Image (cartoon, rainbow, N blue to C red):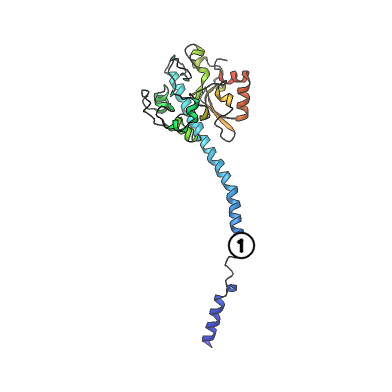
Amino acid sequence: MMRSGWSSAKIRIGNTEANPSAFTLIELLVTLSVIAILAGMLLPALARAREAGLATVCRNNMRQISIGTLLYAGDSDDRLPSPGAEDRNLSPDWVFGGQSDAELLNRNSWKRPQFGFHAEAGSVFNHVTGRQRLPYSERFTNSFPTYRCPSTGILGSALRVNFSLNGWVEAERHQGGVRLGDVRNAATKVLYVNEDPRTMKNAAFHPEGTAKARGVFLVHHGRVNFTFMDAHGESLQNKRVRQILDQAALANEYFDPLR
């Protein structure tokens, strides 16, 4: 009798009806579908959070460069550096280098030593980084994180500098360079802009120039990063930036330091 009972128990245990915790194929598919839906909802949120973090790094880098630029002016007869838009040599460029539209479009050009900008040779370098400024050399292609926006991709990395100084502080435009003491409403006057790398033939931003014509900027979730001549930073709606550039009076209000 005991042998028979043991056999009966073994048969019942092996029966699938005695194992209610097993997944059916339908239940497994439903579970996988729920996981896929949750992942689809979560991944965009993670992407937005990541981009928000990158935008913050970008703003902080711009602010550090802006503070360094103001320190440079304090040691340079109160004059801001040259944006370097032209080879005028009237005052030291804030960074050195530049490239043509054709080079910006040609990925093979991005690997050449002469491509991109040289922060280490720029006039504000030691004030921004605390390191010694170096002579200009095409062979020196180090990249400094403070001069980079982490959202600019491969082209931004090749350029090594992803920010542009307000071109309207150009020395020739204002007879030897703008003095900080002469700037009107410094908190509203643009100092640096996070320009799109595809328009960075030089490291100067002109409201009436390439960026306006092409209508592109480095945009973080619909906003463009700026710093102003009191060194504070803001993120302006891309639509608002377009309005500023399309209206001469607004462009003067934001970019011309002496108006």
Which residue occupies 51% across, 20% down?
167
Badge 1, how many Cα within 10 Å: few under 14, some, many 20+? few
Q: Nearer the viewer, residue 127 or 249?
A: 249
Which residue occupies 53% across, 35% down?
55
Q: Nearer the viewer, residue 72 or 141?
A: 141
**Location of residue 4 with respect to 224 vertically, above or below:** below
Amino acid type at circle 1 is: Glu
**Location of residue 212 with respect to 33 vertically, above or below:** above
Asked where in the image residue 34 lies, by quadrant, the reply is: bottom right
Which residue occupies 63% across, 29% down?
239
Instruction: Pinpoint residue 212: horizontal percent, then vertical percent.
Output: 58, 24
Q: Which residue was labeled with disc 1?
A: 27
Work out which quarter of the rendered image holds the C terminus and state it: top right
Work out which quarter of the rendered image holds the N terminus and state it: bottom right
Instruction: Pinpoint residue 128: horizontal percent, then vertical percent.
Output: 43, 26
Q: Nearer the viewer, residue 145 or 139?
A: 139
Instruction: Pinpoint residue 207: horizontal percent, then vertical percent.
Output: 57, 21
Instruction: Pinpoint residue 111: horizontal percent, then vertical percent.
Output: 42, 32
**Location of residue 161 with respect to 45 vertically, above or below:** above
Q: Secondary structure at mark 1?
A: helix
Which residue occupies 49% across, 29% down?
104
Asked where in the image residue 27 lies, by quadrant, the reply is: bottom right
Q: Nearer the viewer, residue 3 or 157?
A: 157
Of all residues, the one furthest to the bottom in this rendering is 1
Instruction: Look at the image and tell me whether residue 146 can be seen.
Output: no
